[in-house]
Image (cartoon, rainbow, N blue to C red):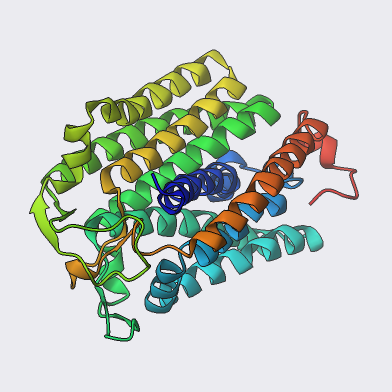
Amino acid sequence: MELYIVLKLIWWALLGVLLIGLAVMVGMDMGVGAALRYLGRTDGERRAAINMIAPHWDGNQVWFILGGGAVFAAWPTIYATAFSGLYVVMLVLLWSMIVRPLGFEYRSKLASARWRGVWDWALFVSGAVPMIVFGAAIGNMLEGVPFHFSWNMVSYYTGSFISLFNPFAVLCGLMSLSLALYQGATMVMGRGEGVIRERAARLATVAGAAALVLFSIGGIWVWQMAGYTITSAIDPAGPAIPLNKTVAREAGAWLHNYGALPVLWLIPVLVYLAVAGGIAAVRRGASTLAWWAGALAWAATLGTVGAAMFPFLMPSSSAPDQSLTVWDASSSAGTLGWMLVFTLIFVPIIVTYTSWAFWVMRGKVTPESIEHDEHAY
């Protein structure tokens, strides 16, 4: 197998790893923000919940940077097409995330209940909206995005902002939010005590069950959905020109890979096992095990989508023949090679310092412990 093909496959897998890291780490923080008004009924309880993620939330945003940088460098055609056509969605995502640090920093500057209530709602919006957008984006990739290229490879998006939040995309967004709420709740279980821990356990149970229901509905939906399949010869080692293939749409096409390689069915099965095991761990009070079960559920969910779509990355609903795939949307072999070298150096460093930070800042956070802490939010 040519080195260029191997590099494309490696970067397809690494893109999945980065998305999983983003979903697990950022989703955990977003889940706490989205559930803040449920987890904390008093100002002290809400401050405790906020300070559970305070040491880590900004560091976890590095997964956004890694994901965006990887798409920009490894899959430039996808980056250009998505960021130019979906710029309104990107702006909504950015605006919601800009409010997030403001909520952390400004919430406790005044003792006014109204002031703090406004920032509590801001943290809710900045937690829920990004996770819904994240899931909706994945849903739109499965349905296809209306774009096409001109003869000189200029991309044109022909859809609307509203069409991106179609029923299937909304379902995927709600599942993403459910997993984020589960992940955040298990983290609060591990660092909270008393009523906060009890509320977090109830939330994790409900959110996990909701995620399984939504995943099941989504699976049936995808089974009946018109997926994409390449019907012409394609050169896996060819250049990044997505204009030299023929693509057909047919119901059930997203299940072709599962039919060709039945072992892939273990990935969606793992979603059910992980979430069910996580809920069981929550009921036993094993918050750490429940957290890792949630991380596994995220990985299996994204793995299910990746296995179904391969080799497609960004299908076009308006011009299927111009859909972007692993084989015709990547950077050059030299770029992918050098990026892999830097990734093998820096990603382990990021994982190491993140793990160290969580270890050093472990322990319980209670309303009483932060009452006289001048460094607490």
Q: Is residue 215 left or right of residue 60?
A: left
Question: Which quadrant: the N terminus?
Answer: top left
Seen in the picture, residue 371 relative to 119 is either above or below; the reply is: above
Q: Which residue appears at 11% of the width and 58% of the height? A: 249
Examine the image and state in which quarter residue 143 appears.
Answer: bottom left
Could you say where residue 223 lies in the image, as x and y percent from the top left? 15, 42
Q: 313 or 86: nearer the eye?
A: 313
Could you say where residue 342 lies in the image, as x and y percent from the top left? 67, 52
Examine the image and state in which quarter residue 318 appears.
Answer: bottom left
Q: 177 or 338: nearer the eye?
A: 338
Asked if one can make out residue 250 in the rendered structure from this viewpoint, the answer is yes
Q: Which residue appears at 53% of the width and 13% of the height? A: 284
Give the total of numbered labels: 0
Seen in the picture, residue 86 relative to 258 is either above or below; the reply is: below
Seen in the picture, residue 78 relative to 170 is either above or below; the reply is: below
Could you say where residue 245 lies in the image, as x and y percent from the top left? 19, 65
Q: Is residue 89 left or right of residue 102?
A: left
Q: In this view, does 291 lie to the left or right of 349?
A: left
Asked if one can make out residue 46 in the rendered structure from this viewpoint, the answer is no
Could you say where residue 181 lies in the image, as x and y percent from the top left? 49, 41
Q: Residue furthest left?
A: 250
